[in-house]
Image (tube, helix red, strand yellow):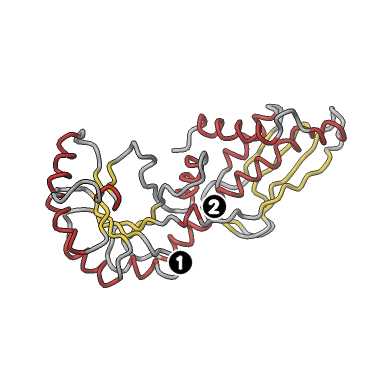
Amino acid sequence: MLTQTAIDRVVRRALDEDAPWGDLTSETLIPADATATADLVAREPGVFSGGSVFRAAFAATDPAIRVELLAADGSAFAAGDRLARVAGPARAVLTAERVALNLTQRMSGVSTLTARYVAAVRGTAARIADTRKMTPGLRALERHAVVAGGGHNHRFSLSDAVMAKDNHLALVGDDLTGALRDARARLPHTTHIEVEVDRLDQIPAVLAAGVDTIMLDNFSLDDLRAGVALIGDRAIVEASGGVNLDTVAGIAATGVDVISVGALTHAARGIDLGLDIALEQG
């Protein structure tokens, strides 16, 4: 869930970075009493995300700025569509413009790419989920954008769940089942345990420990099908590695429950949005 506190923290940091001592250009060229209107306009099609962040960037710059959102997060738009309307003190509108655009373009890029992955697996039972491969400082925003695109969130942070990956397993010794059982015994009963495997022969030891999710990492399609059959309904089956728009449908067809896709965030490009501004008359 994207909270106002998380939004304000990101926006304030971005504004302080962009205008640490004010906006020299706007303060020099634009009369202090000038007011302006501006439209957020899509230059290309996509899926919108970040309306609350867009509004917050202007509000943090000057509370007198009014923002009317014309598109809801998760809604598809075409090139030329108006997504929001801004009105208020011209200097402040110009000062907030780049931060508001940067964050909204980034979030809409993530939601647009996520929607393409979700569409590619439609008709299967597989969920598209994000990973922790996110922009430092923007995790809350990017996770929200994934959901806006129809995807699902993985754990938010290292503090949320146990997720034993290859480097963890390399250090736990030969008794993997015992190590996982010991971990389960020390954890609260509400804690989810997931274990990554990269070979079929690792699955029985992990299953014997009673984990909640088994991640099949970089498996071939044949091995994914075999892994799904071996695990059955004893754990959630997650596929990861080698996932792109060309491969995701085939992976989903193997019967996995979840497909985690780092590309949703690390490979998303910002959607081209523009702020068309005009001096307000009268």
**Amino acid type of the residue that numbered disc 1 sits on in the rendered structure:** Leu
Residue 70: x %, y % from top left: 63, 45
| Image-based side of 2 in relation to 257, left or right | right
Identify which amino acid the numbered label 2 is placed on.
Ser
Q: Quadrant of the C terminus?
A: top right
x 83%, y 31%: residue: 27
Where residue 33 sits in the image (x, y, percent)?
84, 28
To which residue does mark 1 refer?
A: 245
Quadrant in the rendering for residue 261: bottom left
Asked if labels 2 and 1 touch by Cβ distance under 8 angstroms, the answer is no
Q: How many marks on residues?
A: 2
Camera-side residue of 71 and 263: 263
Nearer to us: label 1 or label 2: 1
Q: Residue at x 55, y 31 (%)?
A: 9
Q: Which residue is mark 2?
A: 75
**Element at badge 1?**
loop
Which residue is at a point 39% across and 47% down the rendered structure image?
A: 153
Label 1 to label 2: alpha-carbon separation = 21 Å
- Residue at disc 2, secondary structure: loop
Q: Is residue 227 above or below residue 163?
A: below
The quadrant of the image that shows the N terminus is top left
Locate residue 105, reporting x and y percent: 61, 49
Position of 263 compared to 84: left or right? left
Label 1 packing within 10 angstroms: few (<14), some (14-19), many (20+): some
Q: Is residue 271 left or right of residue 139?
A: right
Q: Mark 2: give few (<14), some (14-19) or many (20+) Cα within 10 Å.
A: some
Residue 218 position (above or below residue 67): below
Quarter location, residue 196: bottom left
Residue 214: x percent and y percent?
24, 54
